[in-house]
Amino acid sequence: MPPGDPIDVLVARIGTDLQRLEDHLKTSGDKRCKVRFPRGFLRKAQHFRARYWFIRDANLKRNVAYSLILSDFYRWVLNRTDLWGTPREMIIKEAICLVGAVAESITKDAMKGHCGKHTGYKPRNAKMVELGIITADLQAQLDALWDWRNNEHLFMLAEWEYGKYELKHYNAAIITVRALRDSIEKWVITKDAP
C-alpha cells in the first residue's frame, strides 16, 4: 500500500492509541476497562453447525461450533496484530491443539457403530481409510495433527517449545480438518443415498 494509505494510517493510530491506553492504565492502577472487540470477523455458532451438519450428537455439534469460534478468535489475533515471540507461538500451539480436539471429536462421532467406544484416534483414522471415507494421505495429515495436538500435555514434552510453532502449522491444521469435514460429509451423503 502507498504511504498515507487510509488503512495504514488507521492501523497506526489504533496501535498507538491502544499503547497509550495500556500505559495510562498501568500508571493509574490498572483501572478495569474493556476495548470493544471488532464485530463481523468471528463467525457464529449457527454457521459452524451448518458446516458440520452431519455430526449426529447435537451437544457435540454445538461444542464443535463453539470451539471453531475460538479458532476464529485465534486467527484474528494472529492475522490482525503484531504479536510475536513466545506469546504468538503459544497461541499458534493452542489453536493447533483446539483443531486437533475438533478432529478427534468429529472422527469419534463419525465412527460410532464402526469402532468400539474406546478405540483411539489413530485407529479410528485407519478405519476411515479402510471404509474409504478418507485417503491414506489425509490419514497421515490427521495423525500428524494428533501428534501436534498431544503437545498440550506439557509433562510429555522432552524439549523446550520455543521456536517450534509457526503459522504454517496452524494453517495446515485448518486445511486438514476441512478435508476431514469434506470427506465425512461426502461419505454421509453417499451412504444415505438410495
Image (cartoon, rainbow, N blue to C red):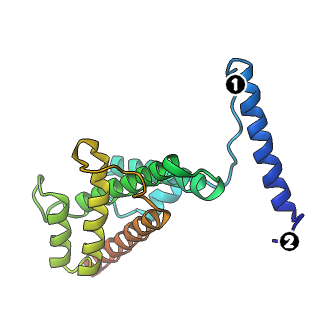
Quarter containing the N terminus:
bottom right
Work out how far the residue at label 1 is from the one at label 2, CA to CA, in angstroms: 35 Å
* Percent coordinates x, y for residue 182 in the rendering: 38, 74
The answer to whether 140 appears left or right of 35 in the picture is: left
The front one of 166 and 46 is: 166
Among the two numbered marks 1 and 2 on one chain, the one whose residue lies closer to the N terminus = 2
Label drawn at residue 2: 2
- Which of the 4 image quarters holds residue 174? bottom left
Label drawn at residue 40: none
Does residue 24 sit above or below 148 in this rendering?
Answer: above
- Which of the 4 image quarters holds residue 175? bottom left
- Secondary structure, mark 1, is helix
Q: Residue at x 60, y 54 (%)?
A: 76
Density class for disc 1 (Cα within 10 Å; few <14, some 14-19, many ≥20) is few
Residue 97 is at least partly visible in this image: yes
Three-letter amino acid code of the residue under disc 2: Pro
- Which of the 4 image quarters holds residue 124? bottom left
* Percent coordinates x, y for residue 7 in the rendering: 82, 61
Count the marks: how many?
2
Assess whether mark 2 and mark 1 are in contact (beta carbons under 8 angstroms): no
Three-letter amino acid code of the residue under disc 1: Lys
* Percent coordinates x, y for residue 129 in the rendering: 19, 77
Q: Which residue is mark 1?
A: 26
- Secondary structure, mark 2, is loop
